[in-house]
Image: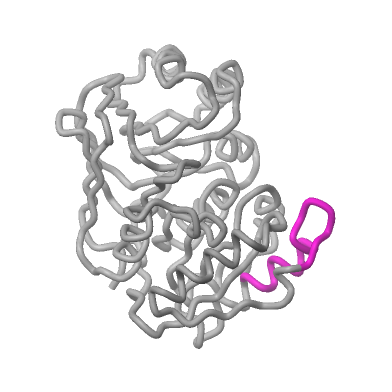
Amino acid sequence: MNPQSQSEPVLPPALKPGDTLGIVAPASPFDRESFDAGLRVLESMNFKLVIPESIFDQNGYLAGSDQQRADLLNRLFADPDIDGIICARGGYGAMRLLPLLDVDAIACHPKVFVGFSDITVLLDSLVQRCRMVVFHGPTVTTLGKADPSTRDRFLSALSTPEPLSIATSSSQVIQSGIAAGRFFCGNLTLFCHLTGTPFQPDFSGGILLIEDQGEAPYRIDRMLTQMRMAGCFEGLAGLALGAFTDCGSAEEVHRIVADRLVGLDLPILAGFEVGHETVNMTLPVGLPVRLDTTFGTLTFAGPAVR
């Protein structure tokens, strides 16, 4: 196991009413109507918002230049007046920022950071390079249309210094068992695209939750096959599946996972409400967690914020 993955995770300060959230757009441009709806949700939670003008820039399919987007992320982490950072949306482009992040400076200023989908690469990088606990959860543009339970979980996960847990909506055991390890969570496609790069995740000894959207079943097969051949799952302690939206039937996805991971002695549990659906539960990435297929749960060993 990577020695860094064995060290104690750094918890960000809990958010409280009146705290200031900085909004970043590390990937694609976003729809203003969805964005404004999400801002109203954040304001209803009694957060103050800092919305840098540069996040509205467009550079083709990117929300501004790579350096501009990376500089803003670095700056908001370093700014003592910013208590947390929420991503406007995913899309594409966050991977291009990985060489430009000032990880040493970011590690000195741990704070709540939230996003999902394309933001997977930033979550993983902050966990593995900064030892920081971050949050896989809604972006600004998805909060406005999110289910009430998603909004409630979002707020409680970021503001309550108590251990979190999540149960499957309908427990679907692919391989039974119990396992514990550091929690990793994100988009399968993005994890696959990191394979072979200097930023390839080290999942050894960990519990991994994957989700995806709009990928045909054969592509799910291809990504898992590539990652298995590349050794990405060697030493993995447990696997959880979130939503695979528009990826074929859940049963077919589960069959593919079972087939591609055959021979690995680890529990695999599907049915978690995490991903590209109206319900998208916020989870802390980088914390120790216990996966139990009997009870259909992920239970974190300690609080995610301090």
Quadrant of residue 148 in the image?
bottom left
Quarter-of-image position of residue 175: top left
Q: Residue 271: image x %, image y %?
A: 33, 31
Pick the residue in front: 166 or 143: 143
Between 85 and 151, which is closer to the camera in this rendering?
151
138 shown above or below 305:
above
* Magenta residues (range): 57-73
Q: Position of residue 16 (x, y in %)?
A: 33, 79
At horizontal 83% and vertical 59% (from top left) the residue drawn is: 59
- In this view, 160 is above or below 117: below
The colour style of the image is one colour
Q: Quadrant of the C terminus?
A: bottom left
Residue 177, position in %: x, y?
20, 26
> Which image quadrant is residue 246 in?
top right
Q: Viewed as shown, does residue 215 lie left or right of 18?
A: right
> Residue 76, percent across and down?
58, 77
Residue 71 on the magenta segment: yes
Task: Pick the quarter of the image with the N terminus.
Answer: top left
**Does the magenta run of residues contain 240?**
no
Q: Nearer the viewer, residue 1 or 65?
A: 65
Q: Is residue 49 left or right of residue 47?
A: right
As drawn, the residue found furthest toward the left would be 294
Residue under the image location 41 percent in, 13 percent down: 255
Relative placement, left or right, of 1 versus 117 is: left
Residue depicted at 45% across the width and 56% down the height? 127
In the image, residue 171 sits, relative to residue 21, either above or below, namely: above
Front residue of 216 and 151: 151
